[in-house]
Image: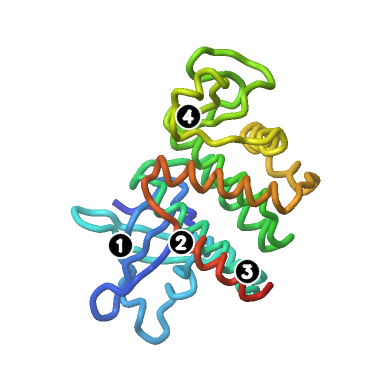
Amino acid sequence: MYYKSRSIVIKNKDYQESDKLVTVFSEKQGKIQAIAKGIKKPGSSLRASIQPFCHSLLFFHSGRGLALITQGQLIDFFGNSREDISRTLHCIYIMELLDKALMEQVAMPRLFKLVLDVLNFINNQGLNPLVLRFLEMQIMVELGYKPEFNHCMNCGQQGNILKSFSPEMGGMLCPECASGHNHCTLLSGEVLGLLKLLLNGNLKTLPRVRASNAVLARLESFLEEYLEYHLERRFNLKHTIRILKQTLS
């Protein structure tokens, strides 16, 4: 079967002598792996369109084994992001997140559009930590791990007394219910407010939001812990980015 799909290239690696195994997040099929034949030969027309975090229109032939990428048309290379090491690393982190979060051959058109919007935002407007946190939150929603911040997951109580989050329960616990759980995370009112914004807001509103570095750091650590809890995987690029920040500061 032949088909074409807009695709975001997650990664590629050597496969046999002149081929590469390419992992993409496609609009029609979700995350898939396919072989780019002859990609390492001089003059291959596919080379530009299968670079990590490219947006390309790819043509596939699927059979019994791995699909083949027969043609490719580059749509966006995100050149501004590639010229800045910090933006490049964060884009590659997004690819790592997709690779570790998505199941194969499960179409997620809403998430596909959101990832493209985030890549375009980073390329055109620069890094914004809240935009990255927004994507992390929405990935969890798409995977079925939407957190609950408005009531106690155990007794249903609501209000400002909710300060403890249980990854196991997937939401907030009141003080009485939290006393029986060993792995709750305390959230300040500001962090909780931002989490609700990330859950229910949209990408366009985020550039107007202001938060301290301490709150942004707490927000990042919370979402990282929540992702790792449910995905049962660690994210290597986060460690590299932290080392880079320490080196440049």
Q: CA distance from mark 3 to mark 1?
A: 39 Å
For discs 3 and 1, the disc positioned in front in the rendered view:
3
Label 2 crowd bin: few (<14), some (14–19), many (20+), radius 10 Å: many
Residue at screen point 28% across, 54% down: 62
Distance from the alpha carbon under mark 4 to that under mark 2: 31 Å
Dot 2: what SS? strand
Image quadrant containing the C terminus: bottom right
As displayed, is residue 124 above or below residue 131? Answer: below
Residue 19 appears left or right of 180: left
Q: Secondary structure at mark 4?
A: loop
From the viewer's side, name the closer residue of 112 and 130: 130
Under tag 1, what secondary structure? strand
Badge 3: residue crowd in 10 Å (few <14, some 14–19, many ≥20): few
Callouts 3 and 1 close, C-beta under 8 Å? no
The residue mark sitting in front, 4 or 2, is 4
Report the amino acid beneath label 4: Gly
Q: Are marks 2 and 3 in contact (CB under 8 Å)?
A: no
Q: CA distance from mark 1 to mark 2?
A: 14 Å
Mark in front: 2 vs 3: 3
The residue to which callout 4 is attached is: 170
Q: Which residue is under mark 3?
A: 245
Residue located 59% across and 72% down the image: 244
Residue 103 image offset from top left, x and y in percent: 35, 45
* Residue occupying the far left of the picture: 64
The tag earlier along the polypeptide, 4 or 2, is: 2
Residue 121 on image: x %, y %: 68, 56
Query: Which secondary structure lies at badge 3?
Result: helix
Q: Position of residue 194 (x, y in %)?
A: 69, 38
- Here the colouring is rainbow
From the image, tell me which residue sits under label 2. Answer: 9
Horizontal and vertical percent position of residue 164: 57, 29
Q: Earlier in the sequence, mark 1 or mark 2?
A: 2
